[in-house]
Image (cartoon, rainbow, N blue to C red):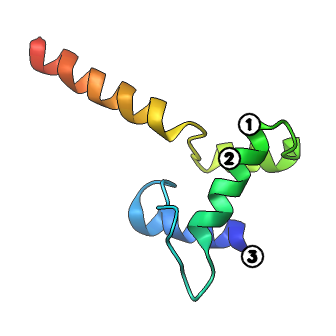
Amino acid sequence: DRFCMLQRYKDREGDCNVPDRYKENKIALGAWLQTQRQDRKNGILDPIYEKRLEEIGVVWDVYTEAWNDKFRMLQRYKD
């Protein structure tokens, strides 16, 4: 199933930030994860699935997370 594929991706890559167009074994894992993010944003993702995805490290808002990462880097550079 796609959740297990996502876990394997994280084990291999170190995070769950799957590119939108990424496919593994001809399965569109990136598109699936984007759908989970959209469903959560729309309030229709099953809370059990949401919890499972959070437990393995899924970032819901990748743009905010990237901004925060860059800001932390800037703070470290300044210090």
Q: Residue furthest top?
A: 79
Classify 54 as above or below 35.
above
Q: Secondary structure at mark 3?
A: loop
Rendering coords of residue 9 (x, y %): 51, 68
Check disc 1: other Cα within 10 Å, few if <14, some if 14-19, many if 20+. few
* The C terminus, quarter of image: top left
Classify 51 as above or below 5.
above
Q: Look at mark 3 in the image and give the residue it sits on.
A: 1
Q: Look at mark 1 in the image and give the residue it sits on.
A: 41
Q: Are marks 2 and 1 in contact (CB under 8 Å)?
A: yes
The Cα atoms of the two marked residues, 2 and 3, are separated by 17 Å
* Left or right of residue 30, residue 12 in this image: left
* The N terminus, quarter of image: bottom right
Check disc 3: other Cα within 10 Å, few if <14, some if 14-19, many if 20+. few
The residue drawn where x is 38% and y is 35% is 66
The residue drawn where x is 63% and y is 55% is 34
Number of the label disc, if any, that sits on residue 37? 2
User: Could you say which quadrant of the image residue 41 lies in?
Assistant: top right
Number of the label disc, if any, that sits on residue 79? none
Q: Compare residues 4 and 22 and report the one nearer the observer.
A: 22
Q: Which residue type carries mark 2?
A: Arg
Q: Which residue type carries mark 3?
A: Asp
Rendering coords of residue 40 (x, y %): 76, 41
